[in-house]
């Protein structure tokens, strides 16, 4: 198997150590690729290349219109290769090809959106209190950006960082998850093909504690943008203090999905499933904390279990597969432990709670869709993210109780409310402490709207105009057109 390389200073290179890593398909554990395994020294080389490219100034002083057309070109290339990219993503993550195809459409859309707004960020003239002067505010690139991504939506999360960083004139070093680097490698081929100059966009493959740690601590990195788990986010935040890097953190969630008795019953049941079981529940915003009004609780849970038991597990490449495997043996072991904890703390397991028995699935990291009821907020399975196909159900009687339950969390990424009473819906979302709240909808995101967390779910925003602003510094320029002595200290 050819060893896939990383991209530093416009060249495809092997790791300086010569180490390699095998990438496997989580559906059957077959080897699908061998990639070079970088470490600190490769990360340092990439940072030096990005620093040189930034300080030399060619990319940051390229007219924004030209950078925008390059970013448009990247969107064109993603659209051209979208089927190949989708299949590669499914091979690497186990998610269904249909889901990956949707991801590719979203990814091209993100590049398109930032190409369109990136050359319209020219700043503003503000009124100056100083006579004969011009006061203006301009937006400039931050500098060298370190970008670290997770394994669940490898290319989607990469696109949220690459597109705004490039269009605003930054240089960057990206480190994808070591488990799922394949589509990001392909993306850098497209970045090269689109004509991004050498040194501007660099890719280093390798582990978090080596490459990721170097990006977080290296003083030549001006901004670190991270998507991943809270514990890693905390380490990065601490490391980034070394030179007070700008910091953007997109972290985990244990997201409440509130269903009132007056919601459309069938839609709410269907959407409670959609909120969780895509990509086997490995979604940061998954609505895993289902919070149901007591009067419909039993009927709702019964309908949900019936539907959930029909979810078809299998190979993401098979047309009738609805849910693929978990990402790795290590993650599967964590999920099994999580479910055991739930049982021990008194939650009632209604379905799932184990690996499937189907012989065709035994080589993959499959776990059955699982539902727990009788859950209370003090439980581990309510307070911690499982990142798995698990729904925990809590009950409420009053609107205030539902809101209190939803907010009783250290996370604040996303949440949902299902009701036909629009005033009640607006009252609830105004009190819910989350970065995204859906009313009669779930898990919808698009490039124009910002994404990010309250509380420990993160710092900063991706997507939307705010996602562009993360990659800019704001400078105020005051130009005195008629300078004169003021003789404050005498003449
Ligand atoms: N908020 C969001 O938009 C969002 C989106 C996707 C995933 N997530 C979260 O990501 C998590 C799952 O992803 P994961 O398991 O890949 O997370 P993770 O934190 O284990 O790893 C994420 C990335 O960080 C790197 N990393 C690990 N240790 C590091 C260190 N010490 N220094 C620097 N980098 C390091 C990893 O190599 C990987 O590239 C979940 O908690 C999920 O909720 C959040
Ligand atoms: C942000 N999102 C929903 C695309 C992926 C979260 O894991």
Image: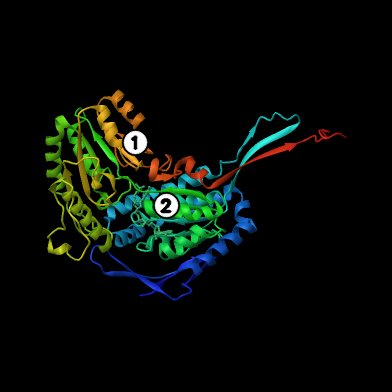
Depicted 110 relative to depicted 430: above or below: below
Coloring applied to the structure:
rainbow
Left or right of 384 in this view: 162: right
Quadrant in which the N terminus is drawn? bottom left
Read off the residue under disc 2: 234
Depicted 36 relative to depicted 273: above or below: below
Q: Can the viewer see residue 418?
A: no
**Which label sits in the foreground, 1 or 2?**
2
Read off the residue under disc 1: 437
Identify the residue at the far right of this view: 491
Tell which quarter ligand 1 is in: bottom left
Residue 106, given in percent of the width and then of the height, sits at 38, 48
Name the residue: 24% across, 40% down: 377
**Disc 1 beta carbon < 8 A from ligand 2?**
no
Name the residue: 30% across, 23% down: 423
Depicted 348 relative to depicted 222: above or below: above
Question: What crowding class fits label 1: few (fewer than 14 Cα within 10 Å), some (14-19), or many (20 or more)?
Answer: many
Residue 439, given in percent of the width and then of the height, sits at 30, 33
Q: Label for residue 7?
A: none
Q: Quadrant of residue 155?
A: bottom left
Q: Mark 2: which secondary structure?
A: helix
Mark with earlier residue (1, 2): 2
Question: What crowding class fits label 2: few (fewer than 14 Cα within 10 Å), some (14-19), or many (20 or more)?
Answer: some
């Amino acid at each position: 198997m050819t060893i896939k390389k990383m991209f530093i200073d416009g060249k495809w290179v092997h790791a300086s150590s010569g180490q390699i890593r095998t990438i496997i398909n989580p559906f059957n554990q077959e080897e699908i690729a061998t990639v070079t395994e970088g470490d600190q020294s490769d990360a340092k080389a990439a940072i030096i290349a990005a620093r040189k490219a930034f300080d030399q100034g060619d990319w940051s002083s390229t007219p924004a219109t030209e950078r925008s057309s390059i970013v448009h070109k990247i969107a064109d290339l993603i659209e051209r290769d979208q089927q190949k990219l989708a299949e590669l993503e499914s091979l690497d993550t186990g998610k269904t090809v249909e889901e990956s195809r949707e991801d590719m459409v979203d990814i091209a859309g993100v590049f398109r959106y930032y190409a369109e707004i990136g050359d319209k960020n020219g700043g503003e003239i503000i009124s100056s209190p100083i006579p004969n002067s011009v006061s203006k505010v301009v937006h400039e690139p931050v500098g060298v950006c370190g970008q670290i991504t997770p394994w669940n939506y490898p290319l989607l999360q990469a696109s949220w960082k690459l597109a705004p960083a490039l269009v605003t004139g930054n240089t960057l070093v990206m480190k994808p998850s070591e488990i799922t680097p394949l589509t990001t490698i392909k993306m850098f081929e497209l970045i090269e093909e689109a004509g991004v100059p050498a040194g501007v966009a660099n890719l280093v493959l390798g582990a978090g504690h080596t490459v990721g740690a170097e990006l977080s601590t290296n003083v030549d990195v001006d901004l670190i943008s991270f998507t991943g788990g809270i514990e890693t986010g905390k380490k990065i935040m601490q490391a980034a203090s070394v030179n007070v890097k700008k910091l953007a953190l997109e972290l985990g969630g244990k997201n409440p999905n509130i269903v009132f008795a007056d919601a459309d019953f069938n839609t709410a049941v269907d959407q409670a499933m959609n909120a969780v079981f895509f990509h086997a529940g490995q979604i940061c915003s998954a609505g895993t904390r289902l919070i149901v009004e007591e009067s419909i609780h039993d009927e709702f849970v019964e309908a949900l279990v019936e539907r959930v038991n029909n979810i078809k597990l299998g190979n993401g490449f098979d047309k009738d597969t609805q849910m693929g495997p978990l990402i790795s043996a290590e993650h599967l072991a964590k999920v099994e432990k999580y479910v055991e904890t739930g049982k021990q703390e008194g939650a009632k397991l209604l379905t799932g709670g184990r690996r499937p028995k189907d012989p065709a699935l035994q080589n993959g990291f499959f776990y059955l869709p699982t539902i727990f009821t009788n859950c209370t907020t003090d439980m581990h399975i309510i307070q911690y993210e499982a990142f798995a196909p698990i729904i925990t159900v809590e009950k409420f009687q009053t609107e205030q109780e539902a809101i209190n339950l939803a907010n009783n969390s250290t996370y604040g990424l996303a949440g949902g409310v299902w009701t036909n009473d629009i005033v009640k819906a607006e009252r609830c979302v105004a009190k819910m402490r989350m970065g995204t709240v859906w009313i009669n909808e779930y898990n919808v995101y698009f490039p124009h709207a910002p994404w990010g967390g309250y509380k420990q779910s993160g710092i900063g925003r991706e997507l939307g105009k705010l996602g562009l602003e993360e990659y800019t510094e704001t400078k105020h320029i005051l130009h005195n057109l008629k300078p004169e002595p003021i003789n404050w200290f005498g003449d």
